[in-house]
Amino acid sequence: MLLRSALILALSLGAASCGTGPKADVQLKGSAWRFALIDGKRPSTDAASIIFLGSKIRVQIGCNLMEGKWSMQDDRLVAAALSQSEIPCSKPVWGQEKAVTALLVATPRLAVDENRMIIQSSGHTAELVRDLQAAK
């Protein structure tokens, strides 16, 4: 836990030089990411991902797909008006979908360090790794 907290702090402190603000917009556009952890737990499915397509974001956690517009304001990810399909999921996947939805609508802090990303709000945290094969 202490190591994870130190990683989050290090990414946050280094964010000004490597991945927030206008540079983060460019760095994220056309990139794809796989969830490594959602609130400290492995995702319930390998499909859990975020793709930044120009000004649109596409988020897949399990059964449902969320899409909407995104932008960066300083070190915060702004995901506006996310639409979401409503297919019933198993309980673990459903819980993770709700957590990621709450995280994204909270205008979370975002820090990128090359191939790792931390998205954090006051209630939720997600750790992601860049998916070079899915990026276009």
Image: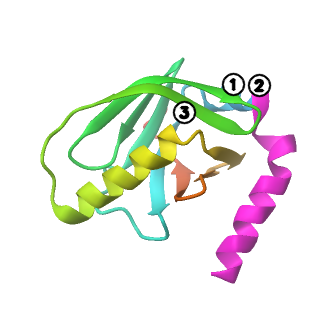
Q: Position of residue 68 (x, y in %)?
A: 42, 24
Where residue 6 sits, quadrant-wise, is bottom right
Based on the picture, tell me whether residue 12 belongs to the magenta stretch. Answer: yes
- For label 2, count other residues whose C-alpha is less than 10 Å away and answer few (under 14), some (14-19) or many (20+): few
The amino acid pointed to by label 1 is Val
Give the residues drawn in magenta, as a range: 1-21
Quadrant assignment for the N terminus:
bottom right
- What's the distance in space between the residues labelled 1 and 3, CA to CA? 10 Å
Q: Which mark is residue 31?
A: 3
Could you tell whether 83 is left or right of 10 in the image? left
Mark 2–mark 1 contact, CB under 8 Å? yes
* Residue 94 in picture, x, y percent from top left: 24, 55
Task: Using a 10 Å C-alpha cutoff, classify the residue at mark 3 as few (fewer than 14 neighbours), some (14 to 19) or many (20 or more).
Answer: many
73 up-or-down from 126: above or below: above
Instruction: Determine which quarter of the picture holds residue 11.
Output: bottom right
Amino acid identity at mark 2: Pro
Q: Position of residue 129 (x, y in %)?
A: 54, 53
Q: Which residue is mark 2?
A: 22
State the CA–CA distance, disc 3 to disc 2: 15 Å
What mark, if any, has residue 46 been given in the picture? none
- At x 77%, y 25%, the residue is 22
